Amino acid sequence: MKENEKPEKGNQIIEEAAQAEYKYGFVTDIDTEVIPKGLDEDVVRRISALKGEPEWLLEFRLKAYRHWLTLKAPTWGHVHVPEIDFQDISYYAAPRQKKPGEGPKEIDPELKKTFDKLGIPLEEQLRLSGMAVDAVMDSVSVKTTYRERLAELGVIFCSMSEAVKDYPDLVRKYLGKVVPYTDNFYAALNSAVFSDGSFVYIPKGVRCPMELSTYFRINAAQTGQFERTLIVADDDAYVSYLEGCTAPMRDENQLHAAIVEIIVEDRAEVKYSTVQNWYPGDKDGKGGIYNLVTKRGLCRGDHSKLSWTQVETGSAITWKYPSCVLKGDHSVGEFYSVALTNNWQEADTGTKMIHLGKHSTSTIVSKGISAGHSQNSYRGMVKIAPKATGCRNFTQCDSLLLSDTSGAHTFPVIEVGNDTSVVEHEATTSKINEDQIFYCNQRGIPTEDAVGLIVNGYAKEVMSKLPMEFAVEAQKLLSVSLEGAVG
Amino acid sequence: MNALKQYIDLFDETRALIEAQSPALLNAVRANAREQLETARLPRKGSEDYEATDLEAVFAHDYGVNVNRLPFDADPGETFHCDVPNMSTCLYYSSNDAFHSSATAERNIGQVVVEPFSMAAVDHPELMNAYYGKLAKMSDPTVALNSLLVQDGLFIYVPDGVVAERPIQLVNIFNAALDMMVQRRLLIIVGKNAAIRILACDHTQSPDYRYLNNQVIEIVAMQGSRVDYYDMEESTPKTSRVSSIYVDQHEGSNVLIDGITLINGFTRNNYHVEVNGEHAETHLLGMTIASGEQHVDSHTFISHNAPRCNSNEMFKYVLNDNAVGAFAGKILVKPNCPRVEAYQGNRNLCGAPTAKMYTKPQLEIYTDDVMCSHGSAVGQLDEEALFYMRSRGIGIEEARRLLMQAFVADVIDGVRLDALKDRLHYLVEKRFAGTLSNCAGCMAACKKS
């Protein structure tokens, strides 16, 4: 028997897994207000006008748009982003309110059903689970719950468009400070056309009593979603923020180019968790979301801490590097990631840890799992500036290969500019251990369950960093996406 | 600015002269090289795989090129009386880019063929034609430049089944009273079940001039062959070197390449290994001890194109003062190559606040049944170990030296020649102690008369 041959059962399981349906693939039939396809200065002005934005924000958008025109789409990723026709995308799709001009008193029942299907807590469910949710559908924030309770503590949690109206000074002070519109191609595009997103501000000394959460969903066809999230944690503040994403099944590819900016002041801590489950395309690689996002946090204060946790199971193409700029002395950056790719998905994800402050530390744990014909890459950078003495970094990135047609790659870059910092990097790539499967089989555990156990154990280090509510969903997601993808 | 232009212009002016003095098969590829260089640019600092290294700046200097092949010096064998303790070698010299044999070599060479390209083109035209320029990638501008200007090289051939008893020793010397660039070129063909060990060392005799060695080495390891290539650089702060080693490994072959940099100015070492047969083994070792303004950049690429082969890489850097170290390594496992085992390690010591290290280990895997890993670390000497030694009465400098020696010891221990191992331990000790003289570094333990 050839060495790379697998037992019959294994093949069957892989087939089943390959055929596992995307269970969030439904379209919500609600009225959507869409700006016609195409992008020019008028569209940028129209988005701004629709949202009733102040002059400075329009200027920001226009500057970003003009800069975007001078840029070319990046091609260095280990992903195949086909040439995107940016004129063939609608840049604004808002669920239309039944009574225009009046604020949302009640949520559209259709929309609520959507969220019910997703199982996210809204209204009553929300009180039970104790989460505050801001749901962003296509591009507009639908409703932010729990706002009053948070307001008592001085915590601001609202949609970006409301923040622009209600807290223009705060938004103006922080918007574009971590990810400037000149940062990269997609960041420039987002800065020009971003429609909504969440804004969080935690005042000095406040520990946010509940997890803040945003759910993103692309619903309308041929639209892109360009949301923008801004989180500011003032001195001694703490917040844990969750983000979930889904999209319905569609034949054509859809674009998602978001920006997340986080600012962490002295002794503050921000925990940002993502469970990303955009539609990954069907088993032949047709359709799916292009998830091309820029996420970056600035640990500006001394002893500040920023922790990214992500579980990436969806999207046809993922191109995302949540990063930390560790500017404050003794600041801490963390990155925990599980990226699972199946069928024809491509993921190029990782992080950047830029150490500028003395004695700053960072930890990177990345677990990649590739099945089917997918390609999964870790790309990271750890940079220690010459003046950042006494820094410490530990990086571990492991890849698990579940099929002989998939690929796993690691591209780390390490730059150390002084003699008191220690940087370590480790990476391994291997297939699932046959001895472990055999051991489980021997104890009466079928191969499929054994694989589930092993993969869950493999990802546990990251899963355990997720808040409880999300850990359950993430674990389910992993098993759905993986269902016996190993033989 | 395009640093290549001056060399293209030089070639255009002197083409007839260059071609008249070279074997025909070297001339045959020049047109292609010329064409490649037309659109090529030398990588600048920050471009892909050149994060810390600016080749454009290195080549931009106005170096002299010995187009006329004027003899510079008397036989270097007369000034270099070389001997490795406890080891008998067949000794060859290259003075700038001209090769010289020695009496020991002629006496002991046996069935192994070592001769300049000009002779090899007559004696072994079929081998030269089959392998010259076939491995080296002309898309790399430094390889194209070498192919454009090279006039001679050294051909080493070990026929099938021949196990060379004595190692071949190649002493490369820069010696000219002007700034100079040379194109060194080696073609090494090791036949089926044959074995050879090659020791190469680079020296510069006149430290006041700027030299640039742009060398290309092609190694073909046939079925079941065994090749050891030890490469040591011990030149001067004004000497630059761009070295590209291309290896083609067949079934069951075993190749070890060990690159050691003790003293240099600027060095870029490229290792490009294509593993084309099952059960082939590849070992790449590297050790750099750098201080002052030394710049050492190693780039490795191992492509596993067959199942059941394995590779092992270990590169260690000790950086002091303003030294800059860079390492980028990639392991590629192509589809349908199960049971590949590949390991890559890069460990670095930064011993001064101004020393810089850039490292980029990479894995690109397209087969599931493999075991591949890489590890990379940048750090300092263990404070506790230092404290322990000081508490036992060893001075701080001595303790640091001992620990640094221990740090690089495992790269030296990978050497498969005991006499050379001892010699390297001795040289590293002297290097750390700062007493390594320009000549003492020669693997051949030169005793200058």
Image: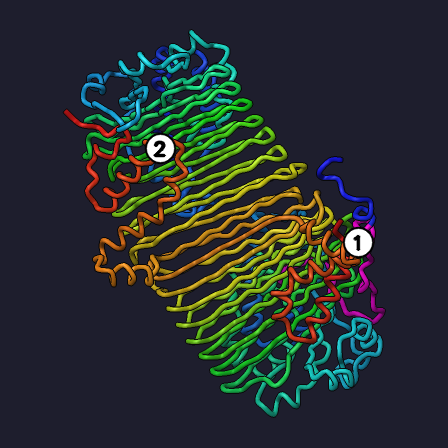
Amino acid residing under circle 2: Asp
The rendered magenta stretch, by its main secondary structure, is classed as loop
- Whole-percent x, y for residue B327 in the image: 42, 45
Q: Which residue is mark 2?
A: B418
Residue named by callout 1: A17
- Nearest the viewer among B108 and B92 is B108
Relative side of B422 to B43, left or right: left
Tags 1 and 2 on a common chain: no
| Pointer 1 chain | A
Q: Is residue A417 left or right of residue A310?
A: left
- Indicate the quadrant containing the N terminus of chain A: top left, top right, bottom left or bottom right: top right
Q: In the image, residue A52 lies at what x, y percent? A: 65, 77
x and y, in percent, of residue A213 in the image: 66, 76
Say which chain tag 2 marks. Answer: B
Q: Which residues are magenta?
A: A13-42
Q: Is residue B154 magenta?
A: no
